[in-house]
Image (cartoon, rainbow, N blue to C red):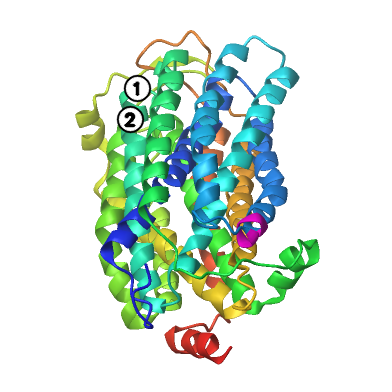
Amino acid sequence: MDNSAAGKVNTKTKFFYAMGEFPGGYLTTILSFFFLIYLTDYVKISPGFAGLILFLGFLFDGITDPLAGYLSDRSKNKFGRRRIFMLSAIVPLGIVFAALFTIPSFCIALSQPLKILVVLVIYFIYIMLYTLYTTPYFAIINDITDNYDERTSMMSWRMSLSILAVLISVVIPDFLGLSNVQTFSTKGFALNGAIFAGLVIGAGLISTFGMKERPNIKAETKKFSIKAYFVDSWKCAPFRQACLCYFCSFACLAAINTCMIYYLNYYLQLPELFLPIAGGVMIIAIAFLPFWNVMCKKFGKKKSQITGAILISIGLLLLATVPASLGGAVGEVGQLSTINLTMGQSLAIFPVVAYIATIIISCGFSALQMISSAIIPDAINFSSDKNQKNEGAFYGVVTLVFKIGTGFASLFIGLVLQITKYVEPPTNMTEGQIIIQPHLAQLGILFVFVALPCILAILSILALKNYNVDREKLAQQINGK
């Protein structure tokens, strides 16, 4: 908690605050890596409709995000105005997440409209519970400290565990065979859902009971207003710029995560690379977090964010030079071909330039995830009225922006796969088999894996062009109110 007028935060509070990132990290990663391909390749929903499902879910968030922020702003619960919502939502959130990867598996034989309806109902319930947990969690940093550098440190802690959550969310599904399209199974998806439901609930409870807000945080008293929560907050230039940067950064990362499994399975034809490449990116990203923490202190968050966006773009463009079909699968479009390469053989085929690109992407990944998140609380403090204590309202808009960004990426990816004639694999595939995709579909996968994230990274830079909130200006704004 805040130990002094300078807003210092002790290590214990930083740790338990960071623990609260695990649930969101697990859930976002599993959905980002595996939900779209689960819908397209296993539940057999066409790519365009699968992408639309994800987008509609995030659009539904437009209702729940600001409302969750408003409710936590007004809360006077003795347990904590933010933490009471986290506590109430975390257990049902884990249960519904498990259902999201279980119930649709029993609906494969249904018609396309019925399958879409089943998925949408469960997904909407999940979104509502996710919002009730994450929006108060995001806002609680402003209830812990106003210190510019302490927030950077807290965000470094949070992003370390966030990336660790991503790593765990790669290793466990890979162990269950979910990263390889040839080994999909109802049992694997259901077991994965159950495992992560337990991890989500455990981490959420530990964080909620472990950290505390500053004492004497007053509750918001103003009534809910669509104009105040959507329009007025967006008029604040620093907040708007930070949100746009956040939108583009996380849409960029979501595109990379979502398309990686398609890229490795159907473009490179090296499915055994998912664990070492996805896991390696996360490990290297964690290793770079202290570097970005130092960069933020020395050069500021804006310059550090721009540097990270440039790096991830360079790495992706290098990866675009890697030839397609390294796995050597041959055959007519739509035919099954066998790939017998082990992980070691696949790693040996992976070119040196691809390893260099992966390291650079990892460095940029670390920056975009941490720094764009660290900019947000500063922009909120700079833009909001401290007497109203309505940070939750701003964070409601932030989480809305985050989810629309992720939803936009999913919708766009699904549409590109649909347009480029992506072929869904049959249900009777055996281990080692892969379906031959049209050349146009391979180009589509390359586009959404490389070009789309590059465009979004560049847009994140442009969003910060006029952003000018730094350590000194933030202090003046807080003290001057």
- Name the secondary structure under disc 2: helix
Q: Look at 56% across and 70% down and name the residue there.
A: 242
Q: Of 137 and 100, which appears nearest the observer?
A: 137
Amino acid residing under circle 2: Ile
User: Which image quadrant for residue 229?
Assistant: bottom right
Visible in this render: residue 270? Answer: no
Q: Which mark is residue 125?
A: none
For mark 1, what is the residue?
176
Amino acid residing under circle 1: Leu
Q: Look at 45% across and 36% down and name the residue there.
A: 30
22 within the magenta span: no
- Name the secondary structure under disc 1: loop
Q: What secondary structure prevails in the magenta region?
A: helix
Visible in this render: residue 241? Answer: yes
Q: Position of residue 297 (x, y in %)?
A: 33, 79
User: Which image quadrant for residue 402?
Assistant: bottom right
Measure the C-alpha gap from mark 2 to mark 1.
6 Å
71 within the magenta span: yes
Q: Position of residue 177 (x, y in %)?
A: 36, 22
Circles 2 and 1: CB atoms closer than 8 Å: yes
In this image, 22 relative to 59: left or right?
A: left
In this image, 428 relative to 386: left or right?
A: left
Q: Look at 46% across and 65% down and name the residue there.
A: 141
Quadrant containing the N terminus is bottom left
Q: Position of residue 305 (x, y in %)?
A: 43, 70
Magenta span of residues: 70-74
In this image, 147 relative to 341: left or right?
A: right
Total labels: the figure holds 2
Crowd class of label 1 (few under 14; some 14 to 19; many from 20; radius 10 Å): some
Quadrant containing the C terminus is bottom right
Q: Is residue 135 above or below residue 216?
A: above
Q: Which mark is residue 172?
A: 2
